[in-house]
Image (tube, rainbow, N blue to C red):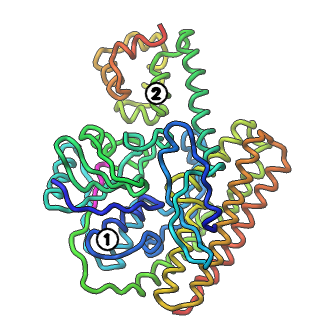
Amino acid sequence: MKINEVPQDPKNFKEGENLRKLMYAVDKDGKYTGVNSAGWEAENFAMKQAWDEVEQELAETETKVKAGELSPLAYFMQKTLMDVPLLAKYVGKWEWQVKRHMKPSVFQTLKPETLQKYATIFNITVDELTGFGK
Amino acid sequence: MGTEFKHYQHAHCESGVTANLLRHDGINITEPMAFGIGAGMFFGHLPFVKVNGTPGSTFRTWPGAIFKRVMNRLGVEMHTERFRSPEKAMQALDAVLAQGRPVGILCSVYYLPFMPEAFRFHFNAHNTVIYGKEGDEYLVSDPILEDVARIKYDDLVKARFAKGTPEPRGFMYYIKNTPANIDYEKAIKAGIKQTSWFMLSPPLPWFGNSAIFLLANRIKKYPQTLPPRKAALYLGNVIRMQEEIGTGGAGFRFLHAAFLQEAGEMLKRDDLLRFSEELTAIGDDWRNFAYHAARIMKARQSDLVSYDELSGLLRICGEKEKDFFKRMDKIKW
C-alpha cells in the first residue's frame, strides 16, 4: 500500500472517529513509514455490521422480555455483549443454570444474592434488573 | 508513582508494547522489527470454534508469543507472572511501578473506558502498558492510541480479570535486565525462519498457509449452506479480524514487509528487500479481497458467482504466499 492509498474514511459511530490508527505504507521511494488512518470503508462496514447485528438482536430480545417470553437477564446479557457461556463464567454457574434463569418463571424465584451477582456483572442495580420490561 | 515514559503509537498492540518497553530501556527498536523477530505473522481458520456465533479466524500468532520470542532472541531478561487474586495482581503491579518500571499487561478491551466504544467487544488478548499511578488512577500507554490515557483502579481490575477465552488472569510482564550487546542478525534470522516455518509446516488444515485455502473453500459454499444474513456476518468477521484487531491493514502483511525491508537494510541484503516488495504486493491483494468482501456484504448479494469470485481472490493470496514462503525458507544465511 502506498502512502496516498492509506484510507481516510472516518467511522462516525460509537466514537470510532476518535481513533486514528497507525498503518504501514510505502512512500514514493518504496520506503516503509507509519501513516495515520482515519479508517477504511471496508473495515468500517464490517464493524458497523457487527454492531447492527448486536442492536438488532437486542431489540428482538427486548420485545420477548416485554412479552414475558424471556427474563430481563437475556436482555442485559446481550446489552453487555455477552453470551451464555461467558455470563456463566462471570456468575460462576453452569450454562444450563444460566439458561434456566432466562425463563421468567424461574427468574422470579431467584435469591436476592443471585440477583445481586447478576446486577453487579451488568453494572446496574437489582431494581433495574428486575424492573426491566415491566 | 510514575516513570518518564515515552509513548509511541503503533499498529498492533503486542508488537507495539514490546517495542515501547524495549525503547524505554534504551534498546532502540521499531515495531516492525519487534513483530518480525517475534514471528508475529500467522494464519488460522477454525470453523468449529465460534466467536460470538461466527467461525474464528486469526491473522497473528497466539497472545504473549511475540513478546516472549523477542526478549529471548535479543537476550533481554524479563519477568512474567499470572495471578489468582485481583488484590495480589494489583499489589504486584504497584510494587513494580514503585521501582519505576513500566509494566505490560494483558487485558480485555471491553473494560477499557478510554477506548472508543466502537472497538469495545469482549476481546481478552489486548496488550497495553501501565507506566505509573496517580491516586486512584493508573497511567496507560496504549500502543494503538495516539496519546496516553488513564484508567481507574476498579476498571483496571475488571480488565485484568476478565473471563472468557483466553483469560488474562492478571498477566503482567516487564523487563528486568538488558544485555550490553545485541546480535540483531541472529535474531532477525530466527524470526524469518520461524515465520516461514509456521506458515508452511503445520500439517493440519486449520493453521498456516493451508488454512487460507480452507477458508477460501468455505467462503465458496457460504451462499449454499447459510442464510444471506449469516453469510454476510461470517464474511464481515473475516474482514474485522484482518483489518480491525490492531493490524493496521491487510492482516499483518504490511507490518511483516516493513520488517523485511528494515532487516534488508540493516544486514545489507538485497534479497530481503525484494521479498519485502513482494509481500507488500501480496498485502495489496489481501486488501483487494477485503474490499470486494465489503462490496458483497453491502449489496446483500448472495449469488454464487460473487462468492465464487471472492473465494478466488483469497486463493490468489494463498497461492502467492505459499510460493513466497517456500522461497523464503530456502534463503541462504
Q: Secondary structure at mark 2?
A: helix
On whether residue B170 falls in the magenta region, the answer is: yes
Residue A86 picture location, percent across and down: 44, 36
Residue A117 drawn above or below residue A105: below
Residue B104 found in image quarter: bottom left
Question: Dot 1 surroundings within 10 Å: few (below 14), some, or many (20 or more)?
Answer: some
Residue type marked 1 = Arg
Q: Which mark is residue B23?
A: 1
Same chain check for tags 2 and 1: no
The residue labelled by disc 2 is: A77
Report the chain holding disc 2: A
Q: Main secondary structure of the magenta part?
A: loop
On whether residue B17 falls in the magenta region, the answer is: no
Give the foreground label among 2 and 1.
1
Residue stretch in magenta: B169-173
Residue B159 picture location, percent across and down: 34, 43
